[in-house]
Image: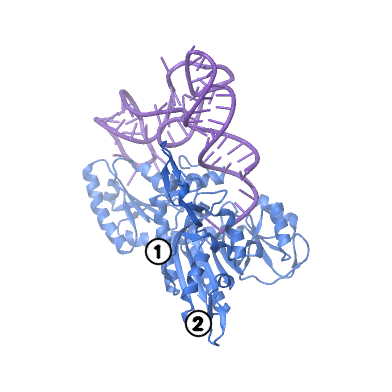
Chain colours: A blue, B purple
Amino acid sequence: MSKGVVSKEEDYSQWYNDLVIKADMAEYSPVKGCMIIKPYGYSIWEKMQAVLDVMFKETGHVNAYFPLFIPKSFFSKEASHVDGFAKECAVVTHYRLKNDGEGNIIVDPDAKLEEELIVRPTSETIIWNTYKGWIQSYRDLPILVNQWANVVRWEMRTRLFLRTTEFLWQEGHTAHATADEAIVETEQMLNVYADFVENWLALPVIRGKKTANERFAGALDTYCIEALMQDGKALQAGTSHFLGQNFAKAFDVKFTNRENKLDYVWATSWGVSTRLIGALIMAHSDDAGLVLPPKLAPIQVVVVPIYKHEEELENIAAYVKGLTAELKAKNISVKFDKRDTHRPGAKFAEYELKGVPLRVAIGSRDMQNGTVELARRDTKTKETVNQEGLSAKIEALLEEIQQNIYQKALKFKTENTTEVDTYDEFKRMLDEQPGFLSAHWDGSPETEQQIKDETKATIRCIPLDNKLEEGKCILTGKPSSQRVIFARAY
RNA sequence: CGGGGUGUAGCGUAGCCCGGUAUCGCGCCACAUUUGGGAUGUGGAGGCCGCAGGUUCGAAUCCUGCCACCCCGACCA
């Protein structure tokens, strides 16, 4: 186990917090619920952004930027939307501070805003207010805009990366001429997210739809991807909403269609956030530290020289220079840690904690033998390999590690997804082997709520690829035509 | 907002019940020896003991008030 990191078994929650802090991903800020994302953590976000941004552009989207502040009145225009967010909004009421004459800085009461400003919890309102000016005809559609931004939601309870008061995300906001087109867009973006999370974060997900209870405030349908964490709790990793004409009606966004008739515009919105970093940490890591999938690791290969004298280091460095050039040509990021202020063992521990997928250790013995020691983070195995052909081997190993991490997570998800048919079994599983529980539900919000109240488990989603199957609701015994996925969730 | 906990050096802590010049570990600095899994020795620096009052000759310790953060719940991505 790594120093200063409590074991996963002992306290999963604490283990997660320790990892985030010790691996240098983030730290607490002076403001409750906010976090400082440190360079190592932020570089993962940058990688995520880079990949997603390409995926968005390949599906026809463009980036724009809308303001942080939203007039309060905008929030009263879509009733269910305000219900959803009213309780967690930061509000700007003044625009100036002043010295009170006794050395205290106070809010200047003379600088009160005529209309309060809301720090965006999400941008549907400001964007749809804007789209009103952009759309007159079907020829103006579709609008396929994404923005990378920060948002603020004044949550009661926060957790590093998983739920912070301010977080970074992207939010796509599209406008369409028809419902069908908007639904296609909603589903397309859900699939983009699922591909990204599975292939880059190496985390298998369930694609599904939310029930009415869990739906986004203002949406007709919320699609989601749900991932399973190592403690058996579910984590919503991304959402894509079909908003219908709700926001168009709220902001009076009409267009003339091909039949020369006035109609409201159809909308979608979709987003993923820095929460994905939390998912990444929780899903793959172990007691020694992070286990990062190579495709998102800020450092893919670290080279640690082992030497007694300066000339040995020079000898090793000369070899590493060539290796580094070969790896860079293959787009593999390498760090050569030749600090003489830390001993090799300390470096090994540090890079394990930080989840660097591959470690190359080279000493004089290796230089004589033409070998290196190659260590994998995911399996914690080491082998001595020839220097010849090393860069090709590293390239192949990185791919193998990516696959292995995914397969391991997939196996975990499969083993912890269980079909249950009675409420007793349902409750027993939640306590004894938490995970995804596939069960029949009568389709009513009341039943869902009662199950939540009694067990803390919620319906994570109705899987998109669900097979229809006759059954009885685990709570009420009423007839059901398909199973849904329950779990306790983050 | 309810429940629990914690504020003492950069980090983690002891001391508090029973008041008397603040403990230990990690880290940091210097030098030396070290370097194939978290080095060792010697020396050194670093503290408004969360804040404000009060009691007292004397407060980290007792009393009052306040503040902050963490954890658990309800709310949520």
Q: Any mark on residue A172, and which?
A: none
Residue A357 visible in image: no
Q: CA distance from mark 2 to mark 1?
A: 32 Å
Residue A248 lies, with reference to residue B36, above or below; the image says below
Residue A47 visible in image: yes
Indicate the amino acid at tag 1: Ala
Q: Any mark on residue A50, and which?
A: 1
Secondary element type, mark 2: helix
Dot 2 or dot 1, earlier in sequence = 1
Residue with the most extreme bottom position:
A259
Indicate the amino acid at tag 2: Tyr
> Looking at the rendering, in which quadrant would you find the C terminus of chain A?
bottom right
Residue A335: give x, y in percent of width and height: 32, 53
* Mark 2 crowdedness (10 Å alpha carbons): few <14, some 14-19, many ≥20: many
Residue A436 lies, with reference to residue B18, above or below; the image says below
Return the residue nearer the eye: A162 or A116: A116
Residue B56: give x, y in percent of width and height: 52, 14
Residue A212: give x, y in percent of width and height: 66, 65
Letter of the chain that mark 2 sits on in the rendering: A
Residue A262 figure quarter: bottom right
Residue A180: give x, y in percent of width and height: 57, 78
Describe residue A167's horizontal placement relative to residue B39 as left or right.
Answer: right
Name the residue rendered at 42%, 36% in the picture. A102
Name the residue rendered at 33%, 40% in the picture. A343
Residue with the most extreme left position:
A311
Q: Are marks 2 and 1 on the same chain?
A: yes
Return the residue nearer the eye: A396 or A367: A396
Residue with the most extreme right position:
A477
Letter of the chain that mark 1 sits on in the rendering: A
The label nearer to you, 2 versus 1, is 2
Q: Which residue is mark 2?
A: A138
